[in-house]
Image (cartoon, grey):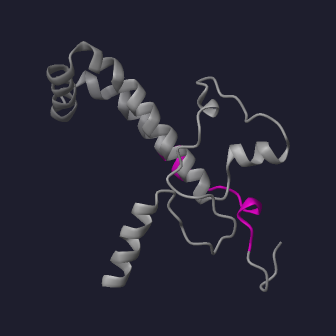
Amino acid sequence: MANAEQPERLTEVDIPKLPLYLAFGVIFGVAPMLPNRYNRDLVYLVSTIYKRVGPVGLLGIPFCTLAMEKTAYDTYTAYHGRSIYADAAKRNEPPPQFPSGGAQLPSFSLIETRKLVADPVVFRLPWIQNVLRRRETNQ
């Protein structure tokens, strides 16, 4: 346990599981029921993609949603001080493999991996960081 003088390292703190359980509950519990009922937003999305891009656009929907899921997962774990890529590099091993092969892609995290609990969130894209700095100075 860390004393009051030293800040607590994020690798020593457990990642909260409740947000993950809720997200997976919504994704796997509610999402499969959406196409079964008339949902204007879903129908609008699919029909717009079909009208503008054609049937090939419908094949792109799963890739976009998987990229969004990987971005959310990588950002969530980076906020809590974990990175499967950095941890594997320390052990001189390849990153852990998942059935989807997502570990072979680069990190889609929107923020840098935090080291300490008190570390601020730093975005990977400098223009986002600059926009946030300008917003903070204007307030």
Position of residue 123 measured from the top left corner of the image (x, y, whole percent): 50, 61
Quadrant housing the C terminus = bottom left
Above or below, 130 against 113 in this view is below
Quadrant housing the N terminus = bottom right
Q: Quadrant of residue 43?
A: top left
Residue drawn where x is 78% and y is 44% of the image: 89
* Residue closest to the eye, 10 or 29: 10
Please tell me whether residue 71 belongs to the stretch shown in magenta.
no
Residue drawn where x is 22% and y is 30% of the image: 42
Position of residue 74 measured from the top left corner of the image (x, y, whole percent): 56, 46
Above or below, 25 against 111 in this view is above
Q: Determine if residue 139 is in view.
A: no
Q: Quadrant of residue 80?
A: bottom right
Number of marks drawn: 0
Please tell me whether residue 20 belongs to the stretch shown in magenta.
yes
Position of residue 66 measured from the top left corner of the image (x, y, whole percent): 46, 31
Q: Quadrant of residue 27?
A: top left
Position of residue 10 measured from the top left corner of the image (x, y, whole percent): 70, 64
38 on left or right of 36: left
Residue drawn where x is 69% and y is 44% of the image: 84
Above or below, 47 against 68 in this view is above
Residue drawn where x is 64% and y is 30% of the image: 104
* Residue closest to the eye, 136 or 32: 136
Residue sticking out furthest to the top = 55
Q: Provide the residue span drawn in magenta.
A: 8-22
51 on left or right of 129: left
Q: Determine if residue 15 is in view.
A: yes
Above or below, 136 against 35 in this view is below
